[in-house]
Image: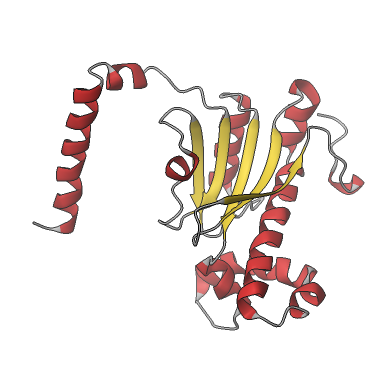
C-alpha cells in the first residue's frame, strides 16, 4: 500500500467512525460554517489549528503559510481575510506562530534558498533588521530565535491592522479583535503575546480616512 493510499483508507475509517458516533454528523456539518475565529498560522504540520485549540469543524477558519506571514501583496491571504471578516463576520483574527519555526531559523541564516523562498523569507529578515539590536543582545541562539518568532508575530498583527479590510471592519462593525499568539512545540501550550482592539492606534500614514 502506498502512503497516499493509506491516507485514503484512513479517511474512510475516520468517516465511518464519525457516522457511528453521530449519524447526522456530516449532514449537519455540510450546512454549518459559523466560525468565530480566523486563524493565520504556520504551514508546519506539527501545528494543526483545530487540534491544539480543541475546536470542531465549522468553528475556526484557517489560513496557513510558511512562518504565518501577512504580506500586503499576497492575494491568497487577503482573499481569506476579506471573506472571513466581511462574509463570515468573524470577531477574532489570530496570528499564531510557533517556537522552533524552521522559516524563522532559515531567515536568520545567510543561506541562499533560491528564488521564491528567498523572497518569502526576506519578510522575516526585515523584522530581524527592525529589532536587530535587541535580538543580537541575546547570546543564546535558541532564545534569540524564539524572540524573533514572537517579534514576527507582533509585526504580522500590525500588518493586519494596516489593511483597509480590517480598518473598515473596525469603523463599521467594531470588530474583529486581533491577537498575537505563539505555540510551544515542547509543551503544547499557546502563549498569548498581545491583543489589538478595534480602532487601536497606529502610525497615521497607514490610516485610511475615506473608507
The answer to whether residue 156 of the structure is visible from this angle is yes
Residue drawn at the location 77% of the way across and 22% of the way down: 172
Look at the picture and state if 53 lies above or below 45: above
Q: Position of residue 202 (x, y in %)?
A: 86, 45
Q: Is residue 94 left or right of residue 159?
A: left
Q: Nearer the viewer, residue 150 or 107?
A: 150
Count of all numbered marks drawn on residues in the image: 0
Residue drawn at the location 78% of the way across and 35% of the way down: 197
Q: Nearer the viewer, residue 121 or 41?
A: 41
Q: Position of residue 73 (x, y in %)?
A: 63, 51
Q: Position of residue 41 (x, y in %)?
A: 54, 50
The answer to whether residue 30 of the structure is visible from this angle is no
Residue drawn at the location 55% of the way across and 74% of the way down: 106
Instruction: Name the quadrant of the N terminus.
Output: bottom left
Hey, which residue is sitting farthest left in the picture?
1
Hey, which residue is sitting farthest right in the picture?
204
Q: Is residue 120 left or right of residue 55?
A: right
Q: Is residue 63 left or right of residue 203?
A: left
How is the model colour-coded? secondary structure
Query: Residue 160, located in which quarter of the rendered image?
Result: top right
Look at the picture and state if 161 lies above or below 119: above
Residue drawn at the location 85% of the way across and 41% of the way down: 207
Instruction: Name the quadrant of the C terminus.
Output: top right
Q: Nearer the viewer, residue 86 or 201?
A: 201
Hey, which residue is sitting farthest front in the picture?
187
Q: Position of residue 16 (x, y in %)?
A: 17, 30
Q: Is residue 157 left or right of residue 95?
A: right
Look at the picture and state if 135 lies above or below 46: below
Q: Nearer the viewer, residue 162 or 13?
A: 13
Amino acid at each position: 500500500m502506498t502512503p497516499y493510499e493509506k491516507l485514503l483508507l484512513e479517511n474512510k475509517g475516520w468517516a465511518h467512525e464519525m457516522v457511528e458516533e453521530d449519524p447526522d454528523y456530516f449532514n449537519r456539518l455540510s450546512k454549518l460554517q459559523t466560525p468565530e475565529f480566523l486563524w493565520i498560522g504556520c504551514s508546519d504540520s506539527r501545528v494543526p489549528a483545530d487540534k491544539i485549540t480543541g475546536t470542531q469543524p465549522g468553528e475556526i477558519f484557517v489560513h496557513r503559510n510558511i512562518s504565518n506571514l501577512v504580506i500586503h501583496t499576497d492575494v491568497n491571504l487577503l482573499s481569506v481575510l476579506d471573506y472571513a471578516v466581511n462574509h463570515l463576520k468573524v470577531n477574532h483574527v489570530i496570528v499564531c506562530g510557533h517556537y522552533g519555526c524552521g522559516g524563522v531559523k532559515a531567515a536568520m541564516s545567510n543561506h541562499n534558498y533560491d528564488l521564491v523562498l528567498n523572497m518569502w523569507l526576506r519578510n522575516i529578515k526585515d523584522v530581524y533588521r527592525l529589532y536587530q539590536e535587541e535580538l543580537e543582545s541575546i547570546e543564546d541562539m535558541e532564545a534569540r530565535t524564539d524572540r524573533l518568532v514572537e517579534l514576527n508575530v507582533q509585526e504580522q498583527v500590525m500588518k493586519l491592522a494596516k489593511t483597509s479590510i480590517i480598518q473598515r471592519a473596525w469603523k463599521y462593525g467594531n470588530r474583529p479583535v486581533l491577537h498575537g499568539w505563539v505555540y510551544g512545540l515542547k509543551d503544547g501550550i499557546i502563549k498569548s503575546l498581545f491583543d489589538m482592539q478595534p480602532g487601536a492606534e497606529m502610525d497615521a500614514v497607514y490610516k485610511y480616512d475615506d473608507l
